[in-house]
Amino acid sequence: MIATEILKEEHDMIIMALGGAKREVLSVHATRKINSEKVERLIDFCWNFIERCHNAKEEKYLMAKMQERGLPSDKEPILVMSLEHKEGQGMVQAMAAALPQAKIGESTALSSIALNLRAYIGLLHDHIDKENNVFFPLADQLFTPEDQKELLRAFKKYEAEEIGSGEHDRYHQLARELAQE
């Protein structure tokens, strides 16, 4: 297995969880209420799995290795991918900030969660499509077999040291649960 295959598998888990997120957006629009437990779990998944685990591996390791192989960080495609990561982080932070007021039914907070969640879903679908079909194939062309092995080791070490033992599997399970709700 190579590094981009791991990232694509994570994309599959993200898409799965986004199905549950989309249903929550539709529910908020229909009922003007949130399922606060589900939204808390969605925010947890988005922040800890997507942003802290998945995107961090892309930025700290994959993009860094692409830069080592001559791709500049201040031009496409690395710049676009990085900016989209930051945009997504802002949306997740906005949802987390609105959640306490949304729990008590405050309409502006409910709208903020629904709008940010909808935008985040759209951003991630487009972003994942670009990564899977353009960015990752480019990375695979740039990397040597040794680069791929180094990336796999770095991913494993990052998950163990920064995310925590068993957390990756826990978030895969959470994605499955969110997809079923």
Image: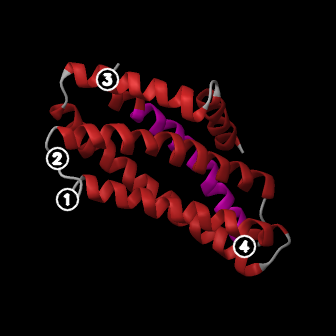
Q: Earlier in the sequence, mark 2 or mark 3?
A: 2
Disc assigned to residue 110: 4
Q: Which is nearer the eye, 170 or 27?
A: 170
- Residues packed near mark 1 inside 10 Å, few (<14), some (14 to 19) or many (20 plus): few
Quarter of the image holding residue 123?
A: bottom left
Mark 1 and mark 2 in contact (Cβ < 8 Å)?
Answer: yes
Left or right? Give the position of 2 relative to 42.
left
Which of disc 3 and disc 4 is earlier in sequence? 4
**In the rendered image, which quarter contains the C terminus?**
top right
Q: Nearer the observer, disc 2 or disc 4?
A: 2
The residue carrying mark 3 is 150
- Relative image position of residue 26 (x, y in whole percent): 66, 63
Q: Nearer the viewer, residue 115 or 31?
A: 115
Report the Cα–Cα distance between label 2 and label 1.
8 Å
Q: Residue at x 72, y 56 (%)?
A: 39
Q: Residue at x 31, y 50 (%)?
A: 130
Q: Nearer the viewer, mark 4 or mark 3?
A: 3
Q: Which secondary structure, mark 3?
A: helix
- Disc 4 to disc 3, C-alpha distance: 44 Å
Magenta part of the chain: 7-29
Labels 1 & 3 near each other (Cβ < 8 A) = no
- The residue pinned by badge 1 equals 75
Q: Amino acid at mark 3?
A: Glu
Q: Which residue is mark 2?
A: 71
Please provide percent x and percent y for residue 69.
Answer: 16, 38
The alpha-carbon separation of the residues under discs 2 and 4 comes to: 41 Å
